[in-house]
C-alpha cells in the first residue's frame, strides 16, 4: 500500500477526506493527519509518505512552504496535491512552479478527488517500477566503476566520478566486505542490498560474482559493516558454507582498490584453509577482465547528440559499440552493455541539468525499448543505442527551447512590473544570463514589438492612466511613468498619441 498524509487546519475537512474517499480502492492508506505545517513536516520526515494532500493557509507553516521545505530537504519528496478555498491564479502559478500534481478547490468533490487518486496511483506505481529498473542498471554501472578501480585504473576523472556517485568525498578510511557462499546466494544478496541502501554504503558484485559492500568511515559505518558480516555468518552458516572477509585501507577513493584486494586475499586464505567464517586482512600472515567505458567514443557521441546532428548519430553509435582495436562489432555482451549504461546515465544527467522530466524520459525509454539487461544480441544493442540517442537528442532540444521560452516569459513579466525603473536590454540580458542580441530577437518574437517599443508603450499607457485619474502635474506624471525627463516624456507622448499630455487630459 502507498502512504498518504492529510494536512488541513480545519478538522471537519480532515474528517471528510478520511471518510468520503475509498483510499484502499486506489492502493492508498492514510498514514497520518496534521492540522498545521510543522506537524505535517515532522510526519513527512519520519514516515516519508508517497502522497500529501495539503491546504495552503495554515498556522506557522503554509502548504506552499511545506512543499518547498520538502523539495529542498528530501532526496525524494512526496508528491503533493493542493486543497484550497481560494481560486487564485497566483496560488495556482506558484503551485505549478513547485511541480504540484493537482490543485483542488474546496469543497472537495468525491469524483474529482478519486480521479486524482487514480492518476496518482498509476504514476507512483510506474515510478516504483522505473526506480527498481534504474537501481538495477545503476548497480551494473557502479560495478563497472569499481572493477575499473580493481584493474588499476587511477585516472583523476574516474576517481572524481566514483567520489561523486558514492558521495564519499573527503573520507580517508575505506573498508570492503566480500561475501562468498555455496548456497542461499539470492537470500544473502537481498539481505546485503537492503543494508547497503543506507547512506555511506555501496553494494557491488565483482567479476566472479562475489557480493561486496564498500563503506567510507563516516560516523560508525565501519563497525556497522563488521556487524553485517558477523550477522550474515550467524544467519546462514547453518545452511551454507559462507565466508565474510574484510579489507581496510586509507587514502580516500584511491584506497578502494587495495581495500578490495585485501578482502579478496583474506577470502582466498580462508578458502584455501577449507573453512567458513569471518576473517580480516589484518589476521593474515603478511606475505577476470571487466568491461570499461570507451570514454573517447562516448564523448564523440554526446557531442553529436548535444549539437543536434541527427545524421551523425549512426556513425558514432557504431564506433561506441565497436572493438577499440579492430573497429569490428564487439562480441563481449557485458562490454557493450556497459557502454550503453554509460550513455544512458550521461543522457539523464544532461536532461536533469536542463530541469527536464527525467522520470518521464526513463519511462518512455522503458516502454519503447524494455530493459537493457534483457538484450543479448548485437543488432538489438545497436537498435537500443540508436533509439536512445535520437530520443535524447530530441528531448534535450525540446527542453532547451522550453527553458528559453520560460526565461523570455519571465523577462516580459519583469518588464511589466518594473517598467517605471530605468531598464536597459543589456542589463536585462545579464540579469537573466542571456545574450543581449538573442534576447532582443526573442523578446520581439514573444511580444510582437521590440524591447524599446514595448517599454515605451507600457510607460505611455501608464501616463494616460495617470492623466485621466490623477491631478498630478505633467512632470510628476512623467516621473511616475518612467520618464525622469519631462521634455522627453512630452515629445514621446506626442509622437505616440498625436497630442500633448495636457490636451489628452482635457479631452479625457
Image: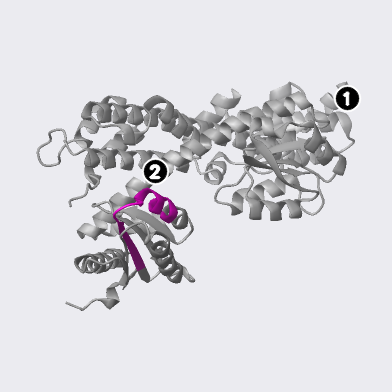
Is 456 within the magenta?
Answer: no
What distance separates the C-alpha of mark 1 from that of mark 2? Answer: 76 Å
Pointer 1 or 2: first along the chain:
2
x%, y% of residue 407? 56, 36
Is 184 within the magenta?
Answer: yes
Determine whether 80 is above or below 183 in the image.
Answer: above
- Mark 2 = which residue? 136
x%, y% of residue 443? 56, 30
- Mark 1 = which residue? 506
Q: Is residue 307 left or right of residue 421?
A: left
Q: Inspect this view and state whether residue 247 appears.
A: no
Q: Nearer the viewer, mark 1 or mark 2?
A: 2
Residue at 30%, 53% in the rendered image: 145
Which quadrant is home to the C terminus? Answer: top right
SS at mark 2?
A: helix
Q: Observer-nearest residue: 496 or 206?
A: 206
Residue lying farthest to the front in this orientation: 238
Q: Residues within 10 Å of mark 1 (few under 14, many from 20)?
A: few
x%, y% of residue 118? 64, 28
Q: Which mark is residue 344?
A: none
Which color scheme does this rendered protein use? one colour
Q: Is residue 301 left or right of residue 164?
A: left
Decide: marks 1, 2 in contact (CB < 8 A)? no
Q: Observer-nearest residue: 472 or 271?
A: 271
Magenta stretch, residue numbers: 175-192
Q: Inspect this view and state whether residue 503 appears.
A: yes
Determine whether 318 is above or below 217 in the image.
Answer: above
Residue at 51%, 31% in the rendered image: 402
x%, y% of residue 180? 30, 58
Residue at 46%, 68% in the rendered image: 224
Determine whether 123 is above or below 426 in the image.
Answer: above
Quarter of image, res 310: top left
Amino acid at each position: 500500500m502507498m502512504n498518504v498524509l492529510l494536512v488541513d487546519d480545519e478538522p471537519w475537512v480532515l474528517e471528510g477526506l478520511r471518510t468520503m474517499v475509498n483510499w484502499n480502492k486506489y492502493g492508498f492508506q492514510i498514514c497520518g493527519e496534521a492540522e498545521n505545517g510543522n506537524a505535517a513536516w515532522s510526519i513527512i520526515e519520519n514516515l516519508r509518505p508517497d502522497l500529501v494532500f495539503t491546504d495552503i493557509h495554515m498556522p506557522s507553516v503554509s502548504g506552499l512552504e511545506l512543499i518547498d521545505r520538502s523539495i529542498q530537504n528530501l532526496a525524494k519528496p512526496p508528491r503533493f496535491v493542493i486543497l484550497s478555498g481560494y481560486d487564485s491564479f497566483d496560488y495556482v502559478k506558484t503551485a505549478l512552479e513547485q511541480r504540484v500534481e493537482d490543485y483542488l478547490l474546496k469543497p472537495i468533490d468525491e469524483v474529482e478527488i478519486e480521479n486524482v487518486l487514480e492518476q496518482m496511483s498509476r504514476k507512483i506505481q510506474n515510478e516504483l517500477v522505473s526506480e527498481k529498473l534504474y537501481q538495477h542498471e545503476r548497480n551494473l554501472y557502479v560495478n563497472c566503476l569499481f572493477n575499473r578501480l580493481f584493474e588499476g585504473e587511477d585516472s583523476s576523472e574516474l576517481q572524481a566520478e566514483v567520489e561523486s556517485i558514492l558521495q564519499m568525498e573527503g573520507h580517508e578510511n575505506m573498508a570492503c566486505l566480500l561475501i562468498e557462499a555455496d548456497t542461499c546466494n539470492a537470500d544473502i544478496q537481498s539481505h546485503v542490498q537492503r543494508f547497503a541502501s543506507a547512506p555511506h554504503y555501496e553494494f557491488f558484485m565483482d567479476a566472479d560474482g562475489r557480493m561486496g559492500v564498500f563503506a567510507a568511515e563516516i560516523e560508525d559505518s565501519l563497525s556497522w559493516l563488521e556487524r553485517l558480516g558477523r550477522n550474515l555468518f550467524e544467519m546462514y552458516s547453518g545452511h551454507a558454507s559462507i565466508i565474510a572477509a574484510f579489507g581496510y585501507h586509507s587514502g580516500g577513493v584511491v584506497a578502494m582498490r587495495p581495500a578490495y584486494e585485501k578482502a579478496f586475499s583474506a577470502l582466498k586464505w580462508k578458502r584455501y584453509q577449507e573453512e567458513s567464517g569471518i576473517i580480516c586482512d589484518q589476521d593474515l600472515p603478511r606475505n577476470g577482465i571487466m568491461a570499461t567505458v570507451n570514454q573517447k567514443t562516448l564523448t564523440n557521441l554526446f557531442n553529436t547528440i548535444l549539437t543536434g546532428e541527427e545524421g551523425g548519430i549512426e556513425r558514432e553509435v557504431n564506433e561506441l559499440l565497436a572493438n577499440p582495436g579492430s573497429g569490428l562489432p564487439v562480441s563481449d555482451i557485458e562490454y557493450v552493455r556497459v557502454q550503453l549504461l554509460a550513455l544512458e546515465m550521461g543522457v539523464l544527467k544532461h536532461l536533469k541539468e536542463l530541469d527536464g522530466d527525467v522520470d518521464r524520459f526513463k519511462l518512455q525509454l522503458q516502454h519503447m525499448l524494455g530493459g537493457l539487461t534483457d538484450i543479448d544480441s548485437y543488432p538489438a544493442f545497436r537498435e537500443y543505442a540508436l533509439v536512445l540517442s535520437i530520443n535524447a537528442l530530441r528531448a534535450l532540444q525540446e527542453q532547451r527551447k522550453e527553458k528559453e521560452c520560460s526565461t523570455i516569459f519571465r523577462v516580459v513579466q519583469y518588464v511589466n512590473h518594473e517598467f517605471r525603473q530605468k531598464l536597459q536590454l543589456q542589463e536585462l540580458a545579464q540579469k537573466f544570463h542571456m545574450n543581449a542580441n538573442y534576447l532582443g530577437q526573442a523578446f520581439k518574437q514573444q511580444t510582437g514589438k521590440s524591447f524599446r517599443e514595448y517599454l515605451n508603450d507600457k510607460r505611455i499607457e501608464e501616463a494616460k492612466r495617470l492623466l485621466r485619474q490623477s491631478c498630478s502635474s505633467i512632470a510628476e506624471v512623467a516621473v511616475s511613468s518612467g520618464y525622469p525627463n519631462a521634455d522627453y516624456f512630452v515629445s514621446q507622448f506626442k509622437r505616440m498619441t498625436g497630442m500633448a499630455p495636457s490636451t489628452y487630459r482635457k479631452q479625457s
